[in-house]
């Protein structure tokens, strides 16, 4: 089994030192920088907007993996693309025409991802899988960091892995929520190849970031 890509979620970083935190987690071995955008409407929390993404962009050359938990989502795609997002992931429930949203992301020159909430079935991807670059399985209900992994999502990860393999395309399967060294192994066994980890990446402060990421990659 290849080691997974690790995408630390800056939701768990020190927001008073966000630029420094992004540099530190990058230097510690992060593969991507995961940026959770919440609007207080689609999910019960408010985080950051495109201005913060733009301010963080000079602090890392790693891919910015931007997860938009906002509705309506279409009106914000261009702003986040211009701010420096490399991957833009959206929820099917966040707009009336998700296929058109995916097309719009590609037109902006970015990779397009689809995020599935815990109660959103894998079959939602049936008519999208050939168009997208990434599937994000939410293993907690989105809105807050530090939640426990919802075990039923393992079956969904397995089902989506089979869907992806049938396409013959390179589509990354990402998991977000309650990822630690135990659930990281389980997710990868089920077919995930990208792990979003907030608490598990940022715990202990900058001196621990390298060890935290190494543990998630090696399931120590």
Image (cartoon, rainbow, N blue to C red):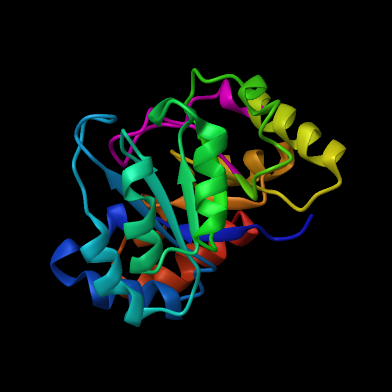
Magenta region includes residue 151: yes
Q: Is 52 situated above or below 101?
A: below
User: Residue, x 46% and y 80% (percent of image)?
Assistant: 61
Front-most of residues 141 and 205: 141
> In terms of image quadrants, where is residue 12?
bottom left
Front-most of residues 154 and 122: 122
Question: What segment carries the magenta color?
Answer: 135-154
Magenta region includes residue 2: no
Say which quadrant the C terminus sits in. bottom right
Front-most of residues 82 and 133: 82
Percent coordinates x, y for residue 175 in the rendering: 55, 42
Q: Main secondary structure of the magenta part?
A: loop
Q: Is 173 situated above or below 35?
A: above
18 displayed left or right of 84: left
Q: Is 203 situated above or below 71?
A: below
Percent coordinates x, y for residue 46 in the rendering: 18, 42
């Amino acid at each position: 089994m290849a080691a997974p890509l690790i995408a630390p979620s800056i939701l768990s970083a020190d927001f008073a030192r966000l630029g420094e935190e992004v540099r530190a987690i990058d230097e510690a071995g992060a593969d991507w920088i995961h940026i959770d955008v919440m609007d207080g409407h689609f999910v019960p929390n408010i985080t950051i907007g495109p201005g913060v993404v733009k301010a963080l962009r000079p602090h890392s050359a790693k891919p910015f993996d931007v997860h938009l938990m906002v509705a309506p989502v279409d009106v914000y795609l261009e702003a986040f693309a211009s701010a420096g997002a490399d991957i833009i992931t959206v929820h099917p429930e966040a707009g009336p025409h998700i296929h058109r949203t995916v097309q719009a992301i590609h037109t902006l020159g970015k990779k397009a991802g689809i995020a599935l909430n815990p109660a959103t079935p894998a079959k939602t991807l049936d008519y999208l899988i050939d168009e997208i670059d990434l599937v994000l399985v939410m293993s907690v209900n989105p809105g807050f960091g530090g939640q426990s992994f919802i075990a039923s999502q393992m079956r969904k990860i397995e089902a989506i892995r089979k869907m992806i393999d049938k396409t013959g395309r390179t589509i990354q399967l990402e998991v977000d929520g309650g990822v630690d060294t135990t659930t990281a192994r389980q997710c990868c066994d089920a077919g995930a190849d990208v792990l979003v980890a907030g608490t598990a990446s940022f715990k202990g402060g900058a001196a621990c970031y390298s060890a935290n990421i190494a543990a998630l990659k090696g399931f120590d």
